[in-house]
Image (spheres, rainbow, N blue to C red):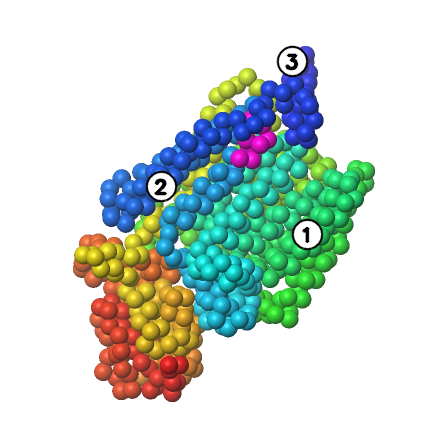
Amino acid sequence: MESLIKVRNNLRKASQLEETHSSGQSSALSAQRTPTLGRLPEVVLWSSFGLLSVALAFNTAIAGTAWTVLFYWLGLLLIILPVAYRLFSVAVSRQERIGLVVFLGLSLYLVKVMHSPYMFTYSDELLHIRNAVNILESKALFGENTVLPVSAYYPGLETVTTAITSLSGLNLFTSGLLVIGVARLVIILSLYLLFEQVSHSSRVAGLAVLIYTANSNFLYWSAQFSYESLALPLGILVLFALAKQGASKDKQMKTGLTLLMLLMIPAIIVTHHVTSYGLVTFLIVLSIVYSFLQTNTKREQPNTWGLALAAGGLTLTWMILVAEPTRVYLYQIFQQAFASVIQLFTGEGVRRALFTSTAGTIAPLWERLVGISSVLLIMIGVPLGLFAAWKRKRLDPFAVVLATAALLYLVTLGFRFTGAGWEVANRTSEFLFVGIAFLIAFGFVTLQLKYPRNRSLSFVFAGCTAILVVGGVIAGWPPALRLSQPLVLAVNGTTIQPQGLEASNWMLVNHGPDNRIIAPPSDALLMLSYGRQQALTGRIYGIKDLLTTLHTPEWQADILQTVQAHFLVMDRRLISWDGMLGAYFSPITASQAVGSDFSPDKIFTMFDGQAKLERIFDSGDIVIYDVGGLSSVKPTK
């Protein structure tokens, strides 16, 4: 009994010391911490070797050198482990913790930049670069985007990027890198300040930001030139401002934070649909929790209901007056996801094979083990954090909502067992992982406070963090896309581009922009972005069947007239139907040598020799036909 009382007293004293330090008050513990940057320069030096290793991996990947994958994973671990070990230490000042998380966030952003250092190549980036080009050329918003029409109704990212381009003279690629880089800095600092405000601990805040980088979309998806990459940081900034406002007693501070939120919310609404809906949902849930806990606490409730009403009203107004197609677009995605889950439980659907690509390639055994281990660590860490948060933070509305988000994340893991559900689970991970990061960090700190003399916990935490981050990368990005792909090759002093990019440039030079053209996804994205054509792809209007199956001339003429296409692209490479991999040079493999990665000749050549169809471009694997004779459409040039 006496030992239990002693442990409880130690926990209480350690907790008080931690909270005192984070709030800026003097304490014995804060006196021991270095008030400067501490060992930040040393950590930066060691972690910089990780960036060097990743750069080496990307360079050797293009050349096809062995050991490339080893350099890649070694580089990520060298970036993460020194930061994780240092952040877990008690004797670290607040300034150093901020420096560590900022360095970590920007280092991981540089990994993405090094992946595609010359131009935007990810599928969503190609969509948004076209929107930016439309704004620059037309000096107007809401230009047509035939591949993803809904993206044009949320021009926040493109507006900021084109403004920088117009004012500075930088090209869109450089301006886009700067915008997303600043957004990465905003989300790192906003997360830190939010976690610190909720936990009253700079240590919990630093560890939580570190753990957040383990979400499956942080390394690549949230660092790409896409509207969510800007909107989500602004959303986290609003949450911090709201948490700070609720704890502040300074009227000027409250007024300033209110103005900040009122500026940020419209910016989010015009930038990304899902982020604005997620923010409204968070505000509503937070308001409910505040109202429920009001009977047990005497704290002043900020005007969360008013903020939720304003955000919800503006979001609804934008959707109705400007972005009405968003409703159908999102409904189809979520409806298919929930339907697939229900079919899986009823036995009517087929379970998605984990760690298996769409081409049937199975991930290596070690990747499967690490991926499963990362999920198990989350499932262990969440209850630990819940137990600690229940004891100390159960009356804190923000802590309650973050815990709810963590539990909802665990529910979404079930969606990953279906093809349609996987996309929803993956897209929501960066939102819900905020709760996961908070709970796991809170639980680890509580555990360390319980065993303050156990130095092995630092190594345990660093190891767990490494598994979480590596597992997140494995779960969120296919192996073929983690390493930099060859986009431009130099042969005897001559620069060679992928056939799809060369075809896009040829179309723009010889036939002008804004021609309606039918193409496989990867070719359509390049035609849309760099060729500046009105490309159409996918299953809509029967386009995929038109390009991949034999059919009658009457049927093809009917489709061409329906979509009013003037040009048609045939690509004999099956990889062209992968919007990500198809944009690069295809690796020379044994399977390609025997033709298993190509369409049958009778499919690839089915448009040859037909009346009113003229072959105008042929690069070997890509052929472009002028089909204006069948569709009665004239070229723009």
Q: Residue at x 35, y 66 (%)?
A: 523
Mark seen at residue 261: 1
Q: Is residue 328 in view?
A: no
Q: Where residue 303 sits in the image (x, y, percent)?
A: 76, 50
Q: Residue at x 65, y 27 (%)?
A: 21
Residue farthest toward the front in the current orientation of the protein? 168
44 or 501: nearer the viewer: 44
Identify the residue under disc 3.
3
Identify the residue under disc 2.
54
Q: Where residue 112 sits in the image (x, y, percent)?
A: 41, 48
Cα separation, mark 3 vs mark 1, equals: 49 Å
Q: Residue at x 29, y 42 (%)?
A: 68
Tell me, yes or no, whether the highlighted magenta stretch contains residue 138. Answer: no
**Tag 1: amino acid:** Met
Q: Is residue 132 above or below residue 357?
A: below
Q: Where residue 484 sits in the image (x, y, percent)?
A: 34, 50
Secondary structure, mark 3, is: helix
Q: Is residue 375 above or below residue 221?
A: above
